[in-house]
Amino acid sequence: MNIVLIGMRGSGKTAVGRLLAKRLGKQFIEMDELIVQRLGQSIPGVVEKYGWEKFRNAEAEIAREVAELDNVVNATGGGVVTGEENIRALKRNGKLFWLKADLDTLLRRIGNDQSRPSLTGRSQREDMETVLAERSPVYQRVADFIIDTEGKTPEEVAEAIANLYTKIRVGQMINAATTVCCVIGDPVEHSLSPVVHNRGYEVLGLNFAYVAFKVKSTRRAIDGIRGLGIRGVSVTMPHKISAMKYIDDADDTARETGAINTIVNNGGRLSGLNTDYGAALKAIKEKTTIAGKRVVLLGGGGVGQAIAMGLKRHGAALLIIDMVKEKAEALAMSVGARSFGGLELLPEISSADILVNATPVGMWPRVNESAVPGELLHRRLTVFDVIYRPRETRLIAEAKAAGCTVIYGYKMFLYQAAMQFELFTGRQAPLPDMEQVLINALEGD
């Protein structure tokens, strides 16, 4: 589905359109620019040489061509709505958003720009006033949504449209044949899993929908998953370990780590898997080697278990630290780590090669916290923070300032989501599209 921005010159269609396209991972198109390219000269030049009819004919031709595209943000010219054929074409595969503003606001935004020819031959104010009075009823009639831009920045307008677009797309997609997937956790409000998975479904045209559930009781949630026929489940904190008790079978990695982050429902039989393991290793290996390295792992929970096993299997000398020393000990014993302990061992980071933060410290909304004192960071250290929201945690920011090599948590998140996507759908994940929408969402934070 396309997003079509309509409205007067000065309504902000181009600025808002660029922001929207970046946020939603869509192609941005500015119709007036395409007309200029097609006719080989500026709009004033076209009007002066050929008249408005030539311009409107080119506009109608391009409107039809753009309407045949998919997944674009289209910033139209102000007068595109004067042609009924244009409106019908743009509505075939798009929703029309009228960016509304009053006369004084439009004139203030335009300023002294005289680059566009007058439609009435009068002064700029008189020209705009006349055209606005003529077109406003048309905008009102054809718009699927009206967005009041008064007192709003382009970023605020883009966010309002993006939120509406998400609701529209999901609403159009869901029906009795829709396959439902979800993420369960507590908290879960911060999760961008729905954004990433739903983008993949959209790109491939799959009748799937992915939603988030805040879950207190793991057992009751999994009973519901089985009973409702939910196809796939992403399991996040604090349920990765407890969920193991309620599934029917688990893959080798899940059994060995004692934690799952993925459930696949095959006709009521629930299989548990752990895609954190492979995703974490992939993210780390993109930046450094593991064999023979001294690694400090913070956190003995579900994510930490998967990463610890992967690090040991690939030859790391591993120290596990948790504020609950017994958790660190249990994990160290299960994977054969060289040592473990409580927070009193944090100074060991100063002689480590790799640091992995698998705790929730620094996660949204407590973004000003870090699990590691900044003075322990050093240039020889590779720092991997599994937290992906915010994109740049305090730990990552301080590590960069200290000259460390950094590995962003969103990479691990993206890779594990892509593995889950393929398990749920049986289709190859459109990784570039999923990564782009994830980055856009994180930058939007």
Image (tube, rainbow, N blue to C red):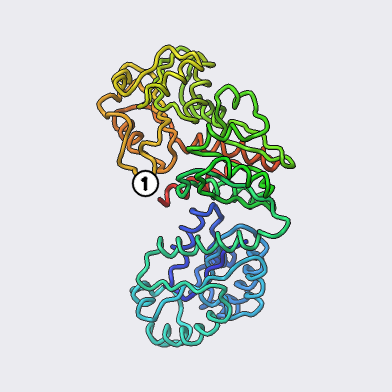
**Name of the residue lying farthest toward the left:** 375
Q: Is residue 45 visible?
A: no
Image height of 8 relative to 295, above or below:
below
Q: Residues within 10 Å of mark 1 (few under 14, many from 20)?
A: few
Residue drawn at point x = 46 percent, y = 83 percent: 132
Please state which of residues 135 and 161 is positioned toward the viewer in this rendering.
Answer: 161
Look at label 1 and name its amino acid. Answer: Pro
Image height of 7 relative to 197, above or below:
below
Image height of 51 relative to 302, above or below:
below
Residue drawn at point x = 40 percent, y = 15 percent: 294
Give the x, y percent position of residue 427. Answer: 70, 41
Q: Quadrant of the N terminus?
A: bottom right
Q: Is residue 5 visible?
A: yes
Residue drawn at point x = 45 percent, y = 17 percent: 332
* 58 with respect to 102 (left or right): right
Residue drawn at point x = 63 percent, y = 44 percent: 223
Give the x, y percent position of residue 3. Answer: 56, 64
Please state which of residues 159 and 358 is positioned toward the viewer in this rendering.
Answer: 358
Task: Give the structural element (helix, strand or loop) at label 1.
Answer: loop
Give the x, y percent position of residue 90. Answer: 63, 70
The number of numbered badges drawn on the structure is: 1
Give the x, y percent position of residue 191. Answer: 48, 46
> Which residue, given by chain and number where applicable, does mark 1 sit on?
365
Q: Quadrant of residue 354?
A: top left
